[in-house]
Image: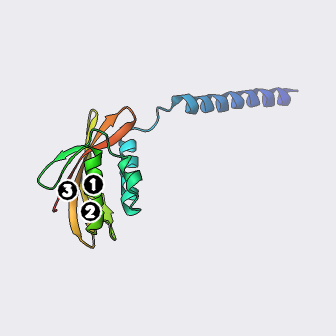
């Protein structure tokens, strides 16, 4: 009888622990951290380029995207899309290799900068700096500097 009572108590304790862990896991997670969300965006960005899937790639850019620099100008996603289409025509998406090995991600509030990203193709090599902004839907690219064009 003592053995059966111990087994019942042990089973009750075990069941309570399993339920507590399950509920803790289900309600205690906050989702991905900013760094994890940015890493996911960078992975999708790289894959969009490697697949030359420009429609997918453009979903990673904010409607507020803007770049005004010596390398190119693009005010909004439409102008950026034109720049990307031109880059494809020029061979800048052929045999692409992207490396984040030396890249640092600096997050300050709702802004993050990822630099340097090494980007090379059969047409040449450049270094990219991505500026990301945390918007309602998550992190999106709001600026992209390209050194070496």
Give percent across and percent down for residue 8.
Answer: 80, 28
Label annotation for residue 82: 1
In the displayed structure, would residue 141 be above or below residue 8?
Answer: below
Mark 2: few, some, or many residues within 10 Å (few <14, many ≥20)? few
Quadrant for the N terminus in the image: top right
Label annotation for residue 45: none
Label annotation for residue 87: 2
In the displayed structure, would residue 110 be above or below residue 88?
Answer: above
Give percent across and percent down for residue 60.
Answer: 36, 46
Q: Secondary structure at mark 3?
A: strand
Q: Quadrant of residue 149?
A: bottom left
In the displayed structure, would residue 136 be above or below residue 120?
Answer: above
Instruction: Kindly tell me whether residue 43 is visible in this rendering.
Output: no
Which residue occupies 29% across, 66% down? 89
Label annotation for residue 146: 3
- Furthest-right residue in view? 1
Which residue occupies 27% across, 73% down? 122
Q: Secondary structure at mark 1?
A: helix
């Amino acid at each position: 009888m003592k053995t059966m009572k111990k087994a019942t108590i042990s089973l009750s304790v075990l069941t309570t622990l399993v339920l507590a862990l399950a509920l803790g896991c289900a309600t205690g997670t906050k989702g991905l951290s900013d760094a994890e969300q940015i890493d996911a965006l960078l992975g999708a960005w790289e894959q969009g380029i490697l697949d030359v899937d420009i429609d997918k790639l453009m979903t990673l850019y904010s409607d507020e995207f803007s770049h005004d620099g010596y390398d190119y100008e693009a005010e909004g996603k439409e102008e950026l899309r034109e720049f990307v289409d031109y880059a494809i025509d020029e061979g800048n998406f052929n045999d692409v290799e992207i490396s984040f090995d030396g890249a640092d991600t600096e997050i300050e509030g709702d802004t993050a900068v990822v630099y340097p990203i090494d980007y090379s193709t059969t047409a040449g090599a450049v270094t990219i700096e991505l500026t990301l902004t945390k918007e309602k839907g998550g992190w999106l690219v709001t600026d992209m500097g390209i050194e070496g064009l």
